[in-house]
Amino acid sequence: MFLSIVKIDALPGQEHIIMDVLESIKGPTSTLAGCLGCSLTIEVGADSTICYQEQWQDRETLDRHLRSPLYSRVLAAMELSRTPPVVEFLEVTKAGGLEVVEIARTTN
């Protein structure tokens, strides 16, 4: 699984524009073959950092999406960042759920 994380430092008062663009991408992206989910959040506080995340089944589907016109809209949203956006692609080789919490809380 691959995780795409984009963090955008919005100018004060511009958060809604970036959020609207990314929200319009989230739905269509989540229906694409190989997409495991999308999320969009904004940090509360002085810094209005917007975080857009996508989960992809494999590298092939991620790459296909990165070449798509839909991803061009993500790039356009990044252009609205006050500072250079943070962009990360992570390959997840192992994932866990609540069992990880249980093991951590029962192990000394």
Image (cartoon, rainbow, N blue to C red):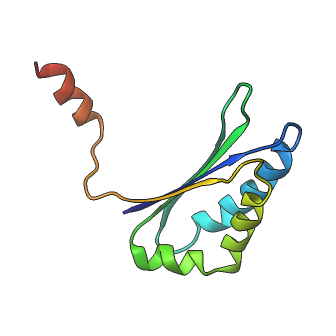
Task: Looking at the picture, tell me which residue is in the foreground, 28 or 104.
Answer: 104
Image x and y of residue 47, in percent: 72, 32
Q: Name the residue located 68 percent from the left edge and 53 percent from the top edge.
A: 84
Q: Name the residue located 76 percent from the left edge and 51 percent from the top edge.
A: 81
In the displayed structure image, the side of residue 96 where residue 50 appears, left or right: right
Image x and y of residue 37, in percent: 52, 57
Image x and y of residue 78, in percent: 72, 59
Compared with 51, 12 (above or below) is: above
Residue sitting at the far left: 108
Which quadrant would residue 28 be assigned to in this image? bottom right
Task: Looking at the picture, tell me which residue is in the foreground, 76 or 25.
Answer: 76
Q: Name the residue located 57 percent from the left edge and 75 percent from the top edge.
A: 65
Which quadrant would residue 71 be assigned to in this image? bottom right
Compared with 48, 76 (above or below) is: below
Which quadrant would residue 56 be assigned to in this image? bottom left
Q: Quadrant of the C terminus?
A: top left
Compared with 107, 43 (above or below) is: below
Image x and y of residue 18, in percent: 79, 51
